[in-house]
Structures are given as C-alpha cells and as structure tokens.
Amino acid sequence: MRSAGPEVLGWFSSGVLVLTIAQQVWKQWKEGTSKGVSRWLFVGQMTASAGFTAYSWLVKNWVFVVTNALMLLNALIGYGIVLRHRRRERRNPQLRTAPV
C-alpha cells in the first residue's frame, strides 16, 4: 500500500502555487492597471503551462495535470487583463502613468 504523504504534499504545494499566482492576477484586476507587467510573461506562462499539462497527462501525474491546467487558465485571465488595460490606455492616454 502506498503512503498518501507524497500526494498530500503535492496537492498542498499545488494549491499554494495556484493561489499565489491567482492573487497576483486579482490584484492586477482590482487595481485597474497592468503597469510593469509584460504580456510576454503570460505568453510564456501559457506556453509552458500547456506543455506541462500535456506532459503531465502523458505520464499520468494528476497533481501536475490539475496544477498546470489551472496555471494555464490563470495565464489566460492575466493576459486578457493586460490586453484590456492596454486597450483602455490607448483610448485614454491620461490613464497611462508610465511606459510599459
């Protein structure tokens, strides 16, 4: 019989990672600005998360399938927020506080 310890540690760590990144995306949304946030951060995260999700699926590591799928969703939301903020700044240049 296999010990549940490693699985519990994996799920706990997954939860911490996903909540940490989600908190940052929420802050970006709540503050109404993406100042200093590169869209390439999210493009890279989406690419890596999609690849890691597929890899994790192939090796049947369900902790990482779920973690990376949630990270991909988080990156999509974050990227959408960045695009929304950039579009709003282009329409209303007074909102732009610094070049990004």
Image (cartoon, rainbow, N blue to C red):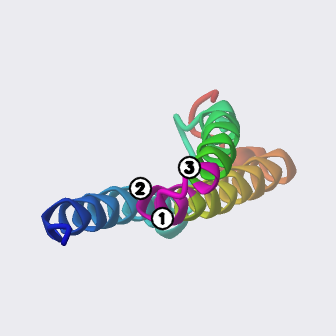
Kind of element beneath mark 2: helix
User: Residue 55 in the image: x percent, y percent?
Assistant: 62, 44
Mark toward the viewer: 1 or 2: 1
**Quick one: SS at disc 1?**
helix
Residue drawn 57% across and 61% down? 74
Magenta residues, start to end: 57-68
Residue 53 x %, y %: 62, 52
Against 19, is 85 above or below?
Answer: above
- Distance of label 3 from label 2 (alpha carbons): 25 Å
Q: Quadrant of residue 96?
A: top right
First of labels 3, 2 by sequence position: 2
Residue drawn 69% across and 51% down? 79
Of mark 1 and mark 2, the one earlier in the sequence is 2
- Amino acid residing under circle 2: Ile
- Residues at marks 3 and 1 touching, judged by CB atoms closer than 8 Å: no
Taking the image as shown, residue 4 lies to the left or right of residue 71, namely left
Which mark is drawn over residue 62?
A: 1
Quadrant where the N terminus sits is bottom left
Asked if residue 9 is positioned above or below residue 49 in the image, the reply reads below
Disc 3 residue crowd, few under 14, some 14–19, many 20+, Cα 10 Å: few
Magenta-span inclusion, residue 59: yes
For residue 27, side relative to residue 87 (left or right): left
| Horizontal relation, residue 74 to residue 4: left or right | right
Front residue (pair 24, 11): 11
Mark on residue 21?
A: 2
Categorize mark 2 by other alpha carbons within 10 Å: few (<14), some (14-19), many (20+).
some
Compare residues 41 and 53 and report the one nearer the observer. 53
Q: Which residue is mark 3?
A: 59
**Amino acid bearing label 1:** Trp
Residue closest to the far front: 1
Residue 77 is one of the magenta-drawn residues: no
